Image (tube, helix red, strand yellow):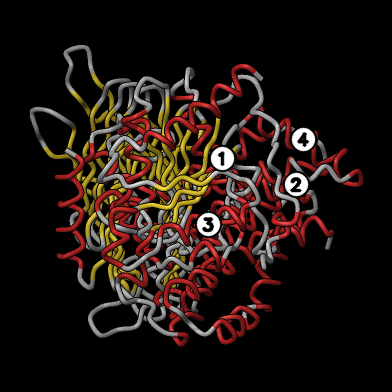
């Protein structure tokens, strides 16, 4: 399945954050919700995806000083396809100066024998701010995960803020103290707001200032609830 | 491999490496590495993440040095973007600064023409350069620089394990030797990517290692730690 | 007998520091000999000077904390160096981290005249590299036994100043100060020796005076 969905949000003359363009493409369904403040859009997966062979792409453009909250509704469960082909999903966020986006998808579960690639590209301009969360779950309960590669790239005015690639599903690497230390869930949260708060950390979580401004919070845990709770500890420490 | 590259890979090279455990101290403090049996997995995991990143940037920097390309600021910010942990960045820059200082004193006629002038340009662009970039700038051969960077990413922690945990140095050395095929393939892959646009260079993450580095740094401020990283 | 290559020809006339950089004086010696207490005393005694301290103990943070708590120095004037379980490596074989720390202090305090570098506690063979310090003080104490000076070793034989510390304890530990002093002078071939007790003279006046003389030599030299 190949799908190309698109979303464009702008701030109108009256100061409202409005969805100007919204193009769903099965299985990527975008549902705008009514709010008084920021534009809120739900991302709903309308089929069992991604399956091996799927190629799903969402592009999001946010205009000057517009605000968007893009939230997932259910976990993404990466499943193997009939012919062992890899699946791919990509999200590209383009933020104009002053734009503010919170991208909060639900966890991605890498099931056994799945082979999935997830790409997030964020291009920020000027003082745009982005908060992006990612929760990766290695396999359903009691299941060994397939393989997942993630690539996160963010830049501001074409200068790199963060570039991180991760490979999950290699037993030795997953177990190693270097990569996932044997934990089943990795949760990360990027805050790209130009701030540089002091580093904070606790057992199995850290919030560290990036070189070019903003922070990356990382939490490892044996389950998603604990991982997200650790993200919360980091957010509290971040202030 | 050049003599200069061998010198940089030597654990006696006065480039600041002895004070860095590459996460081993924090892993040991948490009981994640206790004995010689725990070491191979720690080392290979480190090599496949932080080691790959170091090898990639050492090779890219060597490519720039060999071709007299002044893209040091670009390489610096690209490596920064691939090193989200501030503790890891400062450890890398501390070792880079120390290595540059030691290399600058190696005014060997055969290498000085390239290495000396490259170092000057590098240090003018980035006074506290990343360790991997200094290695590449000095060695100026992508395959050699990548192999040295990959090797140092594991030899330092291996040596730290001997000093910190009293592990058997002979068995620890055996674990290092066992990494030879992996070291070769990491270095070959890094050399193959050396000519890429810096933005397109690989960016392997090491979430747990970064997390341990941040915790190590915090413990430093609150209690005793023997290594700088 | 000393196996230290510099012991045969100790460089007793090292060139003065290049103009514009602070004088660097190392304080070394075995664990517990009183290095940190001496450094604290010097900070108080030389408070009129622009000075800073680099600590190197394996328990670096503790030493730095001791100095901070003692309130003898603005915390910004103390830099701590981690030595990776090898205190002698950091002052002798790979001095880069210490050089970085000294430079960081000199950048922070442009008028800095003196940096005292305190080594981690080590054994009698641990000396500072001449690439790191202009002069070095080696501190031993009477509680370590009155045979220590006779044993020699590069620290005792070649340091620019040998301090025999905690002399007030000599009667308690049965150490003969005359033996220690005599042995020290004999193995050091004319290099100065100071016997002191920070209990009796908390300001370490003899050492402070020696340090001032080294500084004066820079200024006039």
- Report if the CB atoms under discs 2 and 1 are less than 8 Å apart: no
Label 3: state its secondary structure. Answer: helix
Q: Which mark is residue B138?
A: 2
Between the residue at mark 4 and the residue at mark 1, the CA separation in whole angstroms equals: 30 Å
Residue located at (36% from left, 43% from top)? C38
Pointer 4 residue: B69
Label 1: state its secondary structure. Answer: helix
Between the residue at mark 4 and the residue at mark 3, the CA separation in whole angstroms equals: 64 Å
- Closer to us: mark 4 or mark 1? 1
- Image coordinates of residue C105 in percent, x first then y, are 46, 30
Q: Quadrant of the C terminus of chain B?
A: bottom left
Disc 4 residue crowd, few under 14, some 14–19, many 20+, Cα 10 Å: few
- Report if the CB atoms under discs 1 and 3 are less than 8 Å apart: no
Same-subunit check for callouts 2 and 4:
yes
Between the residue at mark 1 and the residue at mark 3, the CA separation in whole angstroms equals: 36 Å
Label 2: state its secondary structure. Answer: helix
- Closer to us: mark 4 or mark 3? 3
Same-subunit check for callouts 2 and 1:
no
Q: Which mark is residue C182?
A: 3
Quadrant of the image occupied by residue A19: top left
Name the one closer to the observer, B33 or A160: B33
């Amino acid at each position: 399945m190949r799908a190309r969905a698109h979303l464009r949000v702008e701030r109108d003359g009256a100061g409202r954050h409005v969805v100007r363009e919204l193009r769903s493409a099965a299985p990527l369904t975008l549902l705008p919700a009514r709010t008084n403040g920021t534009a809120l859009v739900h991302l709903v997966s309308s089929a069992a995806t991604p399956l091996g062979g799927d190629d799903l792409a969402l592009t999001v453009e946010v205009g000057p000083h517009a605000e968007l909250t893009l939230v997932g509704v259910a976990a993404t469960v990466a499943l193997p396809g009939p012919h062992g082909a890899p699946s791919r999903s990509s999200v590209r966020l383009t933020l104009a100066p002053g734009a503010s986006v919170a991208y909060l998808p639900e966890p991605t579960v890498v099931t056994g024998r799945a082979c999935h690639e997830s790409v997030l590209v964020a291009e920020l301009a000027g003082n745009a701010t982005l908060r992006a969360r990612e929760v990766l779950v290695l396999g359903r309960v009691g299941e060994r995960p397939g393989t997942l590669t993630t690539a996160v790239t963010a830049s501001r005015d074409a200068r790199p803020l963060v570039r991180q690639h991760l490979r999950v599903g290699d037993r030795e690497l997953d177990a190693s103290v270097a990569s996932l230390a044997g934990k089943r869930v990795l949760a990360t949260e990027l805050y790209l707001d130009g701030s540089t708060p002091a580093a904070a950390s606790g057992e199995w979580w850290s919030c560290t200032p990036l070189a070019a401004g903003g922070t990356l919070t990382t939490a490892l845990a044996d389950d998603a609830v604990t991982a997200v709770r650790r993200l919360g500890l980091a957010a509290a420490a971040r202030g | 491999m050049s003599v200069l590259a061998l010198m940089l890979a030597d654990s006696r090279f006065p480039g600041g490496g002895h004070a860095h455990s590459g996460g081993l101290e924090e892993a040991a403090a948490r009981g994640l590495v206790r004995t010689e049996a725990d070491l191979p997995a720690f080392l290979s995991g480190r090599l496949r993440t932080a080691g790959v990143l170091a090898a990639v940037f050492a090779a890219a920097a060597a490519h720039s040095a060999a071709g007299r390309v002044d893209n040091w600021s670009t390489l610096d910010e690209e490596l920064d973007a691939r090193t989200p942990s501030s503790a890891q960045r400062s450890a890398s820059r501390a070792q880079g600064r120390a290595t540059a200082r030691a290399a600058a004193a190696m005014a060997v006629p055969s290498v000085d023409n390239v290495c000396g002038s490259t170092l000057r340009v590098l240090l003018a662009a980035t006074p506290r350069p990343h360790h991997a970039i200094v290695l590449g700038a000095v060695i100026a051969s992508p395959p050699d620089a990548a192999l040295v960077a990959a090797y140092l990413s594991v030899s330092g922690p291996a040596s730290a394990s001997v000093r910190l945990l009293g592990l058997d140095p002979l068995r620890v050395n055996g674990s290092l030797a066992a990494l030879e095929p992996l070291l070769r393939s990491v270095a070959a892959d890094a050399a193959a990517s050396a000519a890429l646009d810096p933005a397109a260079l690989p960016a392997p993450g090491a979430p747990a290692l970064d997390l341990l580095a941040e915790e190590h740094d915090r413990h430093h401020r609150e209690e005793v730690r023997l290594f700088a990283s | 007998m000393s196996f230290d290559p510099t012991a045969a020809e100790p460089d007793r006339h090292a060139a003065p520091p290049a103009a514009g950089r602070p004088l660097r004086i190392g304080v070394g010696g075995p664990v517990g000999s009183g290095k940190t207490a001496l450094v604290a005393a010097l900070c108080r005694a030389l408070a009129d000077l622009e000075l800073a301290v680099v600590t190197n103990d394996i328990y670096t943070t503790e030493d730095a904390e001791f100095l901070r708590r003692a309130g003898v120095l603005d915390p910004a004037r103390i830099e701590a160096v981690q030595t990776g379980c090898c205190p002698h490596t950091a002052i002798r074989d790979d001095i880069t981290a210490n050089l970085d720390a000294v430079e960081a202090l000199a950048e922070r305090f442009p008028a800095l005249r003196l940096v005292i570098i305190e080594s981690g506690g080590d054994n009698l063979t641990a000396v500072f590299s001449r690439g790191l310090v202009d002069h070095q003080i080696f501190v031993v104490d009477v509680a370590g036994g009155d045979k220590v000076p006779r044993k020699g070793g590069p620290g005792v034989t070649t340091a620019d100043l040998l301090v025999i510390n905690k002399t007030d304890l000599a009667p308690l530990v049965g150490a003969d100060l005359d033996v220690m002093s005599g042995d020290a002078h004999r193995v050091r071939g004319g290099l100065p020796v100071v016997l002191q007790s920070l209990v009796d003279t908390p300001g370490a006046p003899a050492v402070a005076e020696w340090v001032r003389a080294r500084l004066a030599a820079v200024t006039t030299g």
